[in-house]
Image (cartoon, rainbow, N blue to C red):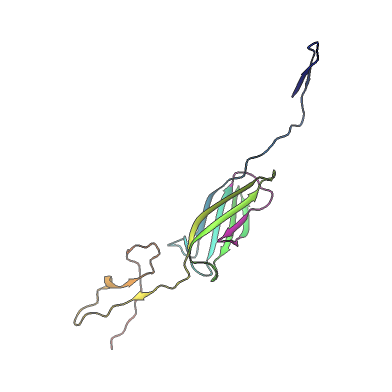
Amino acid sequence: NIEIADLALNPFVYSFDNSLIADTVSPIFSNIQSEVSSNPEFTNHAQEDSVVTITFNSSANLQFNPAVKVNDTPADYQSLNAGEYTYIYTVSDSDAEGNAVVSITGLDPAGNEGSASEESFMIDLSNPIVTIASPETGGIVNHWSFSTNANPDGSDLYRDVTFFYSLE
């Protein structure tokens, strides 16, 4: 509304039918999740050719689909459903091993840019190393002394391992 009074204090009021809204709030990306469906026991560990599904929400409608990258490599847009974006990323042999950083940038209709970056899953391109010590003379091999670095959670918890051997 505009309100004006002349010198005799006669009022003039004008109301706008259409108002202008100034949007200066950047979109916020939240609930960033990733899942490696081919590894059901450790869904946050990916090897070469693993397909990683990345999902997240935006606090605002966007001009275009946001740019999503994994360690600076673009991920592929899949869908927008009920406010949740889904992207797919396939791990390649050129990816760096270690924690993968998912970064998201996007613009709302007013041109405000929002961004988010988060470590999301682990890329492991190395085959496990297995060490088997020879049994001591006259001893019986103890299955608990078998060791491998193949346990991605870093614990020494027992995992199923198939071990083939022959006696000569």
Q: Nearer the viewer, residue 151 or 107?
A: 107
Q: Position of residue 146 (x, y in %)?
A: 30, 73
Q: Quadrant of the N terminus?
A: top right
Vertical comparison of 125 with 61: above or below: below
Q: What are the residue bounds of the magenta stretch?
A: 58-75
Quarter location, residue 162: bottom left
* Residue 90 screen position, x and y as percent: 56, 65
- From the viewer's perspective, is residue 94 above or below residue 69? below
Task: From the viewer's side, name the closer residue of 99 and 167.
Answer: 99
Q: Residue furthest top?
A: 8
Instruction: Give the overall secondary structure of the magenta segment.
Output: loop
Where's residue 89, x and y in %? 57, 62
Residue sitting at x 55%, y 59%: 53
Measured from the top left, where is residue 104 in percent x and y? 59, 53
Identify the residue at horizontal 49%, vertical 56% (top origin). 119
In-image side of 130 versus 142 (left or right) = right
Left or right: where 40 falls relative to 64: left
In this rendering, position of residue 21 left or right of residue 38: right
- The quadrant the C terminus occupies is bottom left
Magenta-drawn stretch contains 161:
no
Q: Is residue 22 left or right of residue 45?
A: right
Single out the residue that lies furthest toward the bottom. 168
